[in-house]
Amino acid sequence: MKIYRARVFTPVADPFTTDADGSYVSHDDGFIAVDGSRITSVGPWDGHPDGEIIDLGRQTLLTPGFVDTHLHAPQLEMIGSYGGHLLEWLNRYTFPTEAKFSDPGHARKVARALCDELVRHGTLCALIFSTIHREATSIFFEEAENYGLRAIIGKTMMDRNAPDYLLESAKDSYDDSRALIRQWHGRGLLRYAVTPRFAPTSTPEQLELAGALKREFPDAYVQSHISENLNEVAWVRELFPEAEYADVYDRYGLLSDRTILAHGVHLTEEELELLSRRATRIAHCPNSNLFLGSGLFPLHRVIESGIGVGLGSDIGAGTTPSMFTAMADAYKVQQVQGVSLSPFQLWFLATLGGARVLSLGSETGSLESGKSADFLALDLRATPLLAMRIERAASIEDLLAALIFMGDDRAVRSAWIAGRQVWTAQPLNSTS
Ligand code: GUN
Ligand code: ZN
């Protein structure tokens, strides 16, 4: 048994629906006890069990690993490709970049770089788009497995409205996706997501086959995009005149509690009602929405409709893998709409809320006995300015605020997934 000693903060309930005070557990001097891959107890230091003690000091905060509910692995290398809104950006930068993943060597290089960046930024669980390429998708799975990441990954499905070099037949995309599901879904910490890119790049035939896959493998995930940009919404109306955007996915059996749709900035009341009925979840990607000028996500309208919301970096329209930035940008996007989110709400969205969105809330997302030991050691003195700001934080709430608005990868000192250290910036002290 390993006993990690430091400050401890973890969400344990939803602060959008529970009192702030009941939504978290915090110990100024606390411990997490880990037996193998599991957390066995969490509490104040004076109640710690026997075991090998790893004392990280009071200037370290133990907190759950971050959960990124939406990102595009192949777009890592094109972050910051500026100019143009969604549809121009896709054509100008994204499709040519994704074409390079027909080369397995390129896929391997980017897959390793992505896994490095995720763990270094404290993201220990992620829902990930690959490209249309089967082999590149397998390589993303292989590297996630090598790094010990908890990941849900899917091969993008596209059979129209993209350059020829990124199109496949509906049948080929079904066959390749099916083979990948059989190979990777449920292997260790890995899961598969059926991944039609978005309604405009799939024919009805391809959406039908994506729905067939979901019926064949009911516990597989589905990921796609919805209502990110007004031109995109108008385009979907032209392509599918008989239905609203959310109805398009629903007709093909693609909406369930294992479906995560990115963005949802411009959803109608009817669509919110449908998504809520299907228990479908939304990945809110504030950094990307600002970068592409997509719009301001109506968080409270979505939550009040009963829809689960997580945070996504949306690399490469999002400009960083950092979930600190995702929290800070989520705050600002609500501020300009007259709503002030609390640090507890933001931290929940980036951890337990995201895990729940991915139906992994009983396994990860918080520091609670019985859960997988997926946690971070954050260095509260990572930079002189952060140290100065934390020094005057009079409450755990204010300490979290300092991390949200000033924290970055330099604050992530070490990371563990299922009890195994997957990242460290410096060696840890260990005393028995
Ligand atoms: N909609 C369809 N494809 C994409 C993509 O790659 N990025 C974003 N942000 N939106 C999309
Ligand atoms: Zn996306």
Image (cartoon, rainbow, N blue to C red):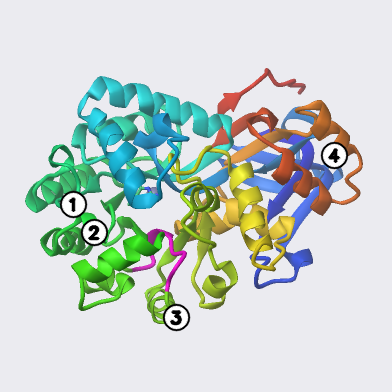
Magenta stretch bounds:
256-267
What type is the residue that disc 4 sits on?
Ile
What type is the residue that disc 1 sits on?
Asn
Q: Circle 4 is placed at which residue position?
A: 390
One can see residue 153 in this view: no
Q: Circle 3 is placed at which residue position?
A: 269
Tag nearer the camera, 4 or 2: 2
What type is the residue that disc 3 sits on?
Glu
- Category of crowding for the residue at label 4, using alpha-carbon neighbours closer than 10 angstroms: few (below 14), some (14–19), many (at least 20): many
Q: Circle 1 is placed at which residue position?
A: 161
From the top left corner, tell me how far across and down residue 112 is, in percent. 40, 24
Q: Gap between marks 3 and 1, in whole Å?
A: 28 Å
Tag nearer the camera, 4 or 1: 1
Q: Earlier in the sequence, mark 4 or mark 1?
A: 1
Please, what secondary structure does the residue beneath circle 4 have? helix
Q: Decide: marks 4, 3 in contact (CB < 8 A)?
A: no
Disc 2 residue: CB within 8 Å of ligand 1: yes
Q: Is residue 262 magenta?
A: yes
Q: Earlier in the sequence, mark 4 or mark 3?
A: 3
Tag nearer the camera, 3 or 1: 1
**As displayed, is residue 103 above or below residue 297?**
above
Q: Is residue 249 magenta?
A: no
